[in-house]
Amino acid sequence: MRNDLILRVVARLLIPFILLFALYVQFHGDFGPGGGFQAGVILAAAVIFYALIYGLADARKVVPEPLVESMMAIGVLVYAGVGVAGLLLGGNYLDYFVLDHDPVHGQHRGIFWVEVGVAVTVSGVMLKIFYMFADRGKVDE
Amino acid sequence: MVAAVWILGRSRNLFVVVILSGVYSFLMATVLTAMDAVDVAMTEASVGAGISTVLLLGALFLCRSEEARPLHKPWLALGVSLAVGGLLVYGTLGLPEFSDPGAPIHRHVVPRYLNEMKTEVGVPNVVTAVLASYRGYDTLGETTVVFTAGAGVIALLRRRREGRKP
Amino acid sequence: MTGVAGAMTLGGHFTYFITVFLMMAGLFLVIARGNLIKKLVGLGIFQTSVYLLYIAPGKLVGGTAPILDPAYTVYSNPLPHVLILTAIVVGVATLALGLALVVRIREAYGSIEEDEIIAGGDDDDAAELEA
């Protein structure tokens, strides 16, 4: 019981920081190491941490399954959507130069949205795989 | 790292194997940082030492067994591994030395990326810029691969409500 | 190859030797061990050794991480970093799929040892022939 309490308190303190760090890695990926993949994995790790300490049912309430499944698909669609936006605005597929008034700003915008799409898909998939593995064990008992 | 892999190969307790694989990934991440590959090190640390270990532990929990004693000594496999290793070592002797600035890898495309990055893209992190902009198609394919893996795991592990066939 | 020249070449290729050793260790685990999870771990070791194979030649001693900054002029090569980043994520995707398959095999055959699975499969085939 005592160990349980320590774990719960430490988790409650750490999880906000892990989430914040995931966001930092995502958005600061342009200036330092980081980017979409790392941020997505750290985000999934934070939710997995929560599920390990507080139980799978609580984690399912916070991050429900339909949300995770739609996150998987939405990330890829965002990425492809940036490409289509390039097409609609007059350039090639996935051309970032035409996305804004200035080619360099267009690159910034394109890279930003692309990284967001990647992070959403990666975190969704990692979380979904964890949910599936954890779910399988229950009914086996 | 070599020691971790050696102990991993010899041990039969699968839990030890999984933990050692996590340790190995973490050590690999430190080596990668020493090689100035900071993005890769962060990804390897979080993915290799984090997610891989979690998934392996999850699968281990579902399978719940130890490795059985091997029936016969793996001499043929050992011989094949050593032979291939010898050939590879012989092949690598022709490769450029460690940290050789004249190696072909530094010649063709990379100077253009490094020099024109400021004017074309304006993002200081070269790896992110190359990944998202110069080689954006590859990243699109990779995101699709991740999505397909998730869909595959769903297809394999989904439960049917009406009970399972043996 | 004279002694001194041989030593210099040897020192310069040290990373390659480590890479090849790790690669062979992974390969050995995949082909020689019957346990499916150990095989997957061996495959993972093989993959990580390949990452080292790609990134080590890109490093320049005295260079720095490839993030543009006015204070530095020499950068390590960023191109392998990009390729390996993709490779790591694809590697974990295949690991997840492989583990899902292992779980299903365990449920279908009751064991994750290669020998027992093959023996179980032979029994099934023999039973089908008799029936």
Image (tube, grey):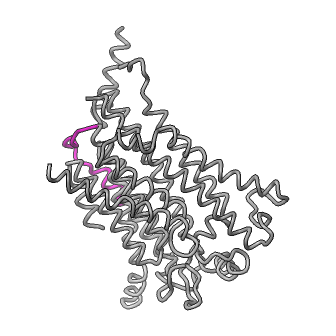
Was residue B32 drawn as part of the magenta stretch in this picture? no
Please provide percent x and percent y for residue A40: 49, 57
Q: Nearer the viewer, residue A2 or B58?
A: A2
Judge from the rendering whether residue B146 lies leftward or rightward of residue A108; answer left or right.
left
**Residue furthest left as drawn:** A2
Q: Nearer the viewer, residue C102 or B119?
A: B119
Q: Nearer the viewer, residue B130 or C106?
A: B130
- Marker count (numbered): 0
The answer to whether residue C30 is visible is no
Judge from the rendering whether residue C88 lies leftward or rightward of residue C45; answer left or right.
right
Q: Quadrant of residue C15?
A: bottom left
Question: Which residue is pictured at 50% across the width and 80% down the height?
Answer: C65
Q: Quadrant of residue C127?
A: top left
Q: Quadrant of residue C128?
A: top left
Task: Find the magenta span and give its range.
Answer: B63-83
Q: Nearer the viewer, residue B142 or C118?
A: B142
Judge from the rendering whether residue B140 lies leftward or rightward of residue C45; answer left or right.
right
**Residue furthest right as drawn:** A90
Please provide percent x and percent y for residue A54: 30, 46
Was residue B66 drawn as part of the magenta stretch in this picture? yes
Question: Which residue is pictured at 37% across the width and 39% down the height?
Answer: A133
Question: Which residue is pictured at 61% across the width and 65% down the height?
Answer: B131
**Which of the image's four quarters has the C terminus of chain C?**
top left
Please provide percent x and percent y for residue C95: 42, 48
The answer to whether residue A123 is visible is yes
Question: Which residue is pictured at 42% across the width and 27% down the height?
Answer: B159
Please provide percent x and percent y for residue C16: 42, 72
